[in-house]
Amino acid sequence: MPFIPHTEDDVREMLATIGAPDIEALFDEIPAALRCGKLKKLPQAMSEMEVAGLMSARADQDGQPVCFIGAGAYDHHIPAAVWQLASRGEFYTAYTPYQAEASQGTLQVLYEFQSMMVALTGMDVSNASLYDGATALAEAVLMAVRANRKSKSRRILMPRSLHPAYRRVVQAMVESQGIELVELPFDPTGGHTDPATLTAFDGQDIAALVIPQPNYFGVLEEVDALTNWAHANKALAIAVVNPVALAVLNPPGEWGEQGADICCGEGQPLGAPLSSGGPYFGFMCCKQLLVRQMPGRIAGCTRDLEGKVGYTLTLQAREQHIRRSKATSNICTNQGLMATAATIHMALLGSDGLERVAAACHANTQKLTQKLTSIEGVEPLFNRPVFHEQVLRLPISADGVLDQLSAMDVLGGLDLSRDYPELGDAILVCATEKRVEAEMDDFQQKLKMILTC
Amino acid sequence: MSEVPNELKYCSSHEWVSSVDDGVVTIGITDHAQDQLGDLVFVELPEVGQALELKGECAVVESVKAASDVYSPVSGEVAEINEALMDSPELVNDDPYGDGWLFKIRLANEAELDNLLDADGYRAAADA
């Protein structure tokens, strides 16, 4: 069913029916002072041909660099079938259609997406996706504060090893709600959150502990010990995970004695292109016990009056259109198209394929680390196991080195000095399954050249 | 009109309150309220020992179409909750004044009971 809204004829007919002269008249009750008026800085409209020309010129400015940057968004291979299928008219709409009577296909895709996410994370239930990883974590923090009725403190422990952008987004979204975010330091040798640092909080009233896996530095956290600490101290454990890494790591549902309570993360590695930062999607899963506090949409499977399988949104009673200001969240939607692409991506790869991708990323990053650290003055900063990223210390200022590499079409990592000045001249590098040996050798030679001249 | 037992007291927000037994009253929602909500699928109750304020939100009854707050008709401390509702929220639909009770409060101020509606008062309020 096509979801093309009203034509001009439809609009005329509707306006005539209600007796309004034009659409503008429908907004009369909004005081003029609150209207933004005409948007004066919008450029003139262009034809399709002109827009296509402009966009290819812009794309050319980006060049075709080889990407060794990860830091939350990853350059994975996306099988051509993913977007060929996701771009079909039935899926490719401006708005995710949820009407059960008209959208069985879309609802079934969301149901399959949720089933896959539950399988990947080892959790009981999944929602139909959120906006992105950072906002998914903010929602998880709000959810934990609502759900943890043993805690009155609204205090959340958040490791400094968590993605800096996630920390900023969570801060922005929860600070006005009286939630206190307490930063946990990372171990300067291991790059992980040492569970021993938590003893300072033993017996205190903490609503939740955030546990990234892997953390921003690519380092694996001691998730079992951290999860157990949270539960021993009546706090909820919130897992922030890379979905590709889950193909080879223990799923959050199995962390520690009881498993994480809420699991969220960025879904981009599952079929969404880097695309200058978006659109991406967030995911969120939780234990059955907490499902009524989970924000967002959930597609459910049921049987109709004739006994046939059907799909419909479920557990909507706490959403905004019913509970208004008392809703669990103002999220009443999902990233339908991205979740659709992720579902197709995971279905094409299968669990074996995803595991091979994860293993190849890990192996490539090991290989890259070896090549780069063979250069004098370049060394790994942390000594603990990583997934597919590594922090390297450079002998000179990272910023200049990365600029020179970029001028030679190599995106040679992310400068960590802005977010982690304590790490000195450090960069975060990543090699996904897409990076081939020749590209790594090229990176090595260019870096060596820059550092020796 | 739905059932409104004469021996109970009521709030216009559709809670009922039993007579006092050793300083404790039982609270539930009325037959009219459960009928308006439809089939309940979940009941969220306060914790035993939790202090409740007069008219404060203290529980949520969720049906397939809405999640509604329950307000405490009196102030006091939660003495007991109806654990059976965790697995069988439909008890509230089947027997709102019996097995479908929500929680019990140890009264902080017995005089608050005088401000509640009697059955006739609630019938009038619910009809209005």
Image (cartoon, coloured by chain):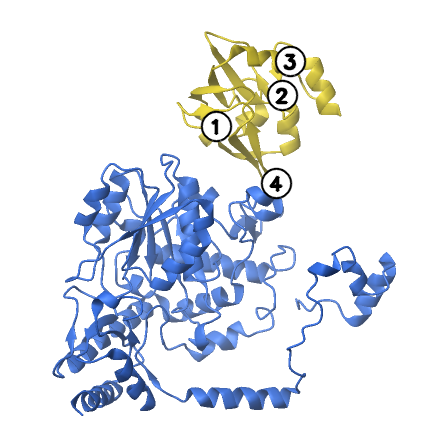
Chain colours: A blue, B yellow
Task: Give the percent coordinates (x, y) of residue A243.
Answer: 35, 63
Give the residue at mark 2: B11
- Could you say which is closer to the camera, residue A130 or residue A410? A410
| Distance Cα–Cα, label 2 vs label 3 | 13 Å
- Disc with the residue nearer the chain's start (4 vs 1): 4
**Residue A350 sits in which quadrant?**
bottom left
Which sits in the foreground, A76 or B39? A76
Q: Residue at x 16, y 66 (%)?
A: A382
Q: Nearer the viewer, mark 2 or mark 3?
A: 2
Q: Which residue is mark 4?
A: B65
- The answer for how far apart the CA atoms under marks 4 and 3 are is 27 Å
Q: Chain of mark 2?
A: B
User: Looking at the picture, which amino acid does disc 4 mark?
Assistant: Lys
| In this rendering, the label closer to the viewer, 2 or 4 | 2
- The amino acid beneath tag 2 is Cys
Instruction: Work out whether A408 lies above or below A213.
Output: below
Pointer 2 and pointer 3: residues touching (CB < 8 Å)? no
Q: Residues within 10 Å of mark 1 (few under 14, many from 20)?
A: many
Q: Residues within 10 Å of mark 2 (few under 14, many from 20)?
A: many
The residue at which mark 1 appears reads as B85
Tag nearer the camera, 1 or 2? 2
Q: Amino acid at mark 3?
A: Pro
**Is the N terminus of chain A in the top left, top right, bottom left or bottom right quadrant?**
bottom right
Asked whether the residues under marks 3 and 1 belong to the same chain, the reply is yes
Residue A257 in view in this figure? no
Give residue A323's quadrant in the image.
top right
Label 1 element class: helix
Q: CA distance from mark 3 to mark 1?
A: 22 Å
Quarter holding the C terminus of chain A? bottom left
Residue B53 place in picture, x, y as percent: 50, 24
Could you tell me which residue is drawn at 52 percent across and 9 percent down?
Answer: B20
